[in-house]
């Protein structure tokens, strides 16, 4: 388990064998964001349309703990292809009002 602003850990025997930590990081690369647009007229189960957006800027990733069933080295290769979540007012954690 990692202690930070929020305790993190994986759960279950298999996940515990795959558990690893990524340290906090600030970097710049082209990355995606995904929005979900609700469509009330859609068939049940298809009410949300995915919209992908991409751009490039410096941003941070908080330290986190997780596990998965593919090699850890593959994460670095796939990182820019994974949709990101971060604060666009303060993408590297600075206070925009300061």
Image (tube, helix red, strand yellow):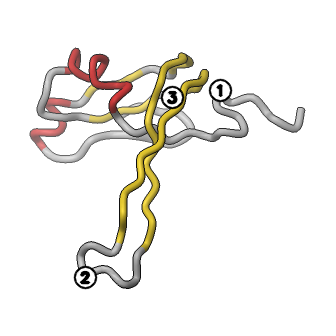
| Mark 3 element type | strand
Asked if the residues shown at circle 2 and circle 1 are in contact, with their CB atoms under 8 angstroms apart, the answer is no
Q: Report, in whole angstroms, how far the alpha carbon at label 2 lies from the one at label 1.
A: 39 Å
Task: Tell me the tag on residue 92.
Answer: 1
Q: Is residue 50 left or right of residue 4?
A: left
Q: In which quarter of the image is residue 40?
A: bottom left
- Who comes first in sequence, dot 1 or dot 3? 3
Q: Which mark is residue 61?
A: 3
Crowd rating for badge 1 (residues with CA inside 10 Å; few <14, some 14–19, many 20+): some
Closer to us: 47 or 6: 47
Mark number, residue 9: none
Percent across and percent down for residue 38 are 43, 72
What is the x, y in percent for residue 65?
35, 33
Q: What residue appears at the point 54 percent right and 16 percent down from the top-left corner?
A: 27
Q: Which of the pair 5/87 is nearer the observer?
A: 87
Q: Give the crowd class for mark 2: few <14, some 14-19, many >=20 residues within 10 Å.
A: few
Q: Residue at x 79, y 34 (%)?
A: 95
* Mark 1 and mark 3 residues within 8 Å of each other at the beta carbon: no
Answer with mark 2 or mark 1, whichever residue precedes in sequence. 2
Direction from residue 73 to residue 93 in the image, left or right:
right
Which picture quadrant has residue 26? top right
Q: Earlier in the sequence, mark 3 or mark 2?
A: 2
Circle 2 or circle 1, nearest the eye: 2
Residue, disc 2: 44
Instruction: Label 2: state its secondary structure.
Output: loop
Q: Distance between the residues labelled 1 and 3?
A: 8 Å
Q: Which secondary structure lies at badge 1?
A: loop
């Amino acid at each position: 388990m990692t202690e930070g602003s929020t305790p993190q850990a994986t759960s279950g025997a298999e996940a515990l064998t795959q558990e690893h930590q990524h340290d906090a990081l600030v970097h710049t690369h082209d990355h995606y964001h995904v929005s979900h647009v609700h469509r009330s007229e859609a068939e049940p189960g298809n009410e949300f349309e995915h919209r992908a957006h991409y751009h490039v800027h410096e941003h941070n990733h908080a330290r986190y703990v997780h596990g998965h069933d593919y090699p850890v080295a593959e994460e670095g290769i796939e990182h820019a292809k994974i949709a990101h979540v971060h604060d666009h007012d303060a993408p590297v954690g600075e206070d925009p009002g300061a």
